[in-house]
Image (tube, rainbow, N blue to C red):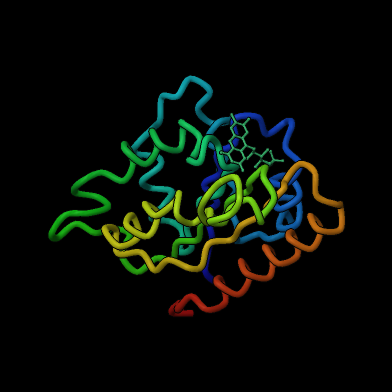
Amino acid sequence: MAKALIVYAHPAHQRSRANRALLNRISDLHNVTVHDLYETYPDFFIDVEAEQKLLLEHDVIVIQHPVYWYNMPALLREWQDLVLEYGYAYGRKQQRLAGKQMWVVLTAGAPEHTYSETGVNERPLSDYFHHYPRMANVCHLDMKPTFEVYHGRHSPDEDIDKAAEQYRSCLLKYLKEFPTDA
Ligand SMILES: Cc1cc2nc3c(=O)[nH]c(=O)nc-3n(C[C@H](O)[C@H](O)[C@H](O)COP(=O)(O)O)c2cc1C
């Protein structure tokens, strides 16, 4: 079976509700590696070689994080700059990640209706993350539809449970769909 790597960036995982629920729901899956960037690199010094090797060992790359200031947390941005470098992730003949799947998982604090033209956040959440499809394109990754959890800290428990169930189903589906030789 294919293998998934969850590149997880949460500056305060100890206080997490939404991401914790998602990750708990897939903790029994042996072919899924949860890679917590803030736990691994509290000093922000990223081991680029180790990160690149880890990516090569997996088929489905999940980028998962809470939305911080309409963006990704800082360590993930650093990871992106350093790990997805020219000659490894992109370049004329060096697209080492080509053909892998990419799945972005976002949790937002605000309710979904606020991310609309008439809402306080003025536009859909996806508009703030238009760089992810570009990243997939440049690295020749097959990007799956982004998974979004809204109102992460205050929605009813049953909504979080439902989101976690959907998250697990999607991940299993992408793993199953991934073409392997076996
Ligand atoms: C520094 C900071 C910035 C944040 N910026 C946003 C934001 O721009 N939009 C939003 O919807 N939520 C924002 N939030 C709320 C978090 O996204 C939300 O609490 C988190 O996704 C919930 O997931 P968790 O329970 O796993 O922490 C922010 C929170 C913090 C601490």
**Picture coordinates of residue 115, whole percent (x, y):** 58, 53
Tell me which residue sits at (73%, 31%) in the image: 14
User: Against 74, is 31 above or below?
Assistant: below
At x 31%, y 46%, the residue is 84
Task: Determine the image quadrant of residue 59.
Answer: bottom left
* Residue 172 x/y as whole percent: 63, 70
- Residue 128: give x, y in percent of width and height: 45, 49
Residue 66 location, x and y as percent?
60, 42
Q: Quadrant of residue 173?
A: bottom right
- Observer-nearest of 68 and 64: 68
Q: Quadrant of ligand 1?
A: top right
Image quadrant occupied by the N terminus: bottom right
In screen coordinates, is 69 left or right of 19?
left
Q: Residue reaching furthest front?
A: 118
67 relative to 132 in the view: left or right: right
Q: Is residue 32 left or right of residue 29?
A: left
In this view, the residue in front, 31 or 132, is 132
- Toward the left, the furthest residue is 92
Dividing the picture into quadrants, the one containing residue 56 is bottom left
Which residue is painted at 49% across and 56% down in the image?
Answer: 126
- Relative depth, front residue between 54 and 144: 144
Residue drawn at x 45%, y 38% as measured from the top left: 76
Q: Above or below — where is 117 with respect to 140?
A: above
Determine whether, in the image, residue 42 is placed left or right of residue 82.
right
Report the label total.
0
